[in-house]
Image (tube, rainbow, N blue to C red):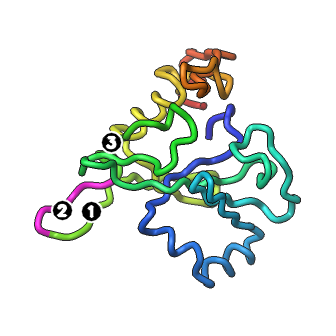
Amino acid sequence: LLPQECDVDIALWRRDSHRLIQAQLRSALAAAGVAMYYLPNYYVFRFCPMHFAPEAESRSVDGRVACRPPYIDAHLADLAPDSEDSWDYIHRSDSRYARSFPLAGLFKERPGVPGFEDLRLRTRFGDYAWIWIPRPDTSSVYLSTLYGGDWSTALRQRDGPFDLNGKPGLGALVHNDTAAAFRGLF
């Protein structure tokens, strides 16, 4: 989790998105106190805690259906066109996302066998959960593209000056902590 973000963004394979409408998942989400919204303009599924009333969040892409932070946005993704070793988002609402990212730290094709081998790493997330994360060969490229090459030690504003297409660029540096004791905390 990065402190300049109001949500957790995940990439959801388009071919798996049909699972989100299954009654079992919806029941499990409701039992856990989570509401799910679909934002069709952005190809995003948003997961919000139900104990907070949905309200506009100024840092959200869509200020009409928003949650109080933190929330989870699942952005639909697919293999990049004409490339078997990279992926991209289906909707690119921000110029930072308008590129392809390597699959190397996520999945690898298995010769002669349909599907992919899962290369992600399993790690602890807090005291009670385990999550799967991409290997550095994917995550480093992704995080550097979205947050700058100094993402592990620098805290930046969410958006910077607009580019020629009117899209926000990399945010201004707010804090840079290169002290070894703090390295990698955000």
The secondary element bearing badge 2 is classed as: strand
**Is residue 161 placed above or below 95 in the rendered structure?**
above
Q: Amino acid at mark 1?
A: Phe
Q: Nearer the viewer, residue 119 or 171?
A: 171
Q: Is residue 58 magenta?
A: no
Determine which quarter of the picture holds residue 111. Answer: bottom left
Q: Is residue 45 visible?
A: yes
Q: Separation of disc 1 and disc 2 at Cα?
A: 6 Å
Q: Can you identify the residue that label 1 sits on?
A: 116
The secondary element bearing badge 3 is classed as: strand
The image position of residue 9, as x and y in percent, is: 58, 48
Q: Amino acid at mark 3?
A: Pro
Q: Can you identify the residue that label 3 sits on?
A: 102
Residue at image coords 86%, 52%: 55
Residue at image coords 38%, 53%: 120
Residue at image coords 62%, 15%: 176
Q: Separation of disc 3 and disc 1 at Cα?
A: 14 Å
Instruction: Rate crowding at label 3 as few (under 14), some (14 to 19) or many (20 or more) other CA atoms within 10 Å.
Output: many
Q: Amino acid at mark 2?
A: Arg
Q: Earlier in the sequence, mark 2 or mark 3?
A: 3
Is mark 3 in CB contact (under 8 Å) with mark 1?
no
Q: Is residue 181 visible?
A: no
Q: Can you identify the residue that label 2 sits on?
A: 110
Q: In the rendered image, which quarter contains the N terminus? A: top right
Residue 108 appears left or right of 121? left
Is mark 1 in CB contact (under 8 Å) with mark 2?
yes
